Image: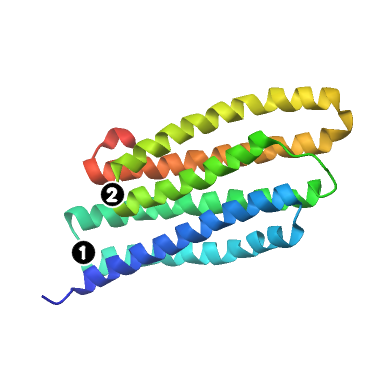
Amino acid sequence: MPRTRLEREMDTIRDNLQEMGLLISRDITDAMNSLERRDVDLAENVIKDDKRINDLYSDLKERCIQTIALHQPVARDLRFLTIAIDVVYNMERIADYADDIAEIVYYVRKCPENMKEIREMGVIAKNITENAYKSFLEKDLELVAVVEKDEELMDEFFEKIFPLLKNFVGEKPEALTFAMNMIMVAKYLERIADHAFNIAQRTRYAVLGDTKSL
């Protein structure tokens, strides 16, 4: 049986969403590596990627809207398309935070310090982002549960960061610039987890029709 135009459009949207997710996951990793290594060139690559991600977001949103308007999907397909618009918005916001982290590199490039807690938060941010967009594409409620657990873990790390940095500066006042910027990085990572959590909740709604998730 030949595939319909709607089915082909849906496949293209899924492929483009996966492309966007892979690019964002890579940028989170590169942003954190550039921060730890003080690698300005790598940070600039992350910043340059922001335009490509913004273009993907705009194209995906427009494709979803056009698909709804031209093909009038119903039931499961309509739910997927309407939720996909929200999912790609959250993904674009995650990319913005990766970009913000990369920009921090310019301000700490002369600071020798690093924090293992920030590094661990970065790992969570990458994993939670990957699991969030995959949960939507694969309709995987087990991944949703993993995202929810990691979001709680990220919150726990975030609550520890300020006291740790306060003590750090108390012992090493010359590290104030580093500490202030790490507070910003921690906040960006915590916001990444929040947006990933939002995506996972949209997945729950897409699979179960559970409006309490929204």
How far across and how far down the image is residue 67, in percent? Answer: 29, 67
Q: Residue furthest bottom?
A: 2
Q: Residues within 10 Å of mark 2 (few under 14, many from 20)?
A: some
Instruction: Please tell me which of labels 1 and 2 falls first in the chain.
Output: 1
How far across and how far down the image is residue 141, in percent? Answer: 29, 41
Q: Identify the residue at horizontal 28%, vertical 65% (top origin).
A: 10
Residue 72's mark?
1
Q: Could you say whether the residue bearing mark 2 is in a helix, strand or loop? A: loop
Q: Is residue 81 left or right of residue 22?
A: left
State the quadrant of the N terminus.
Answer: bottom left
Amino acid, disc 2 = Lys
**Mark 1 to mark 2 CA distance (whole Å):** 22 Å
The residue carrying mark 2 is: 139
Marker count (numbered): 2
Amino acid, disc 1 = Gln
Q: Residues within 10 Å of mark 1 (few under 14, many from 20)?
A: few
State the quadrant of the C terminus.
Answer: top left
Q: Nearer the viewer, mark 1 or mark 2?
A: 2
Viewer-side residue, 211 vs 128: 128
Name which quarter of the figure residue 113 lies in: top right
Q: Is residue 108 left or right of residue 141?
A: right
Q: Could you say whether the residue bearing mark 1 is in a helix, strand or loop? A: loop
Q: Identify the residue at horizontal 80%, vertical 46% (top origin).
A: 108
- Determine whether label 1 and label 2 are within 8 Å by CB: no
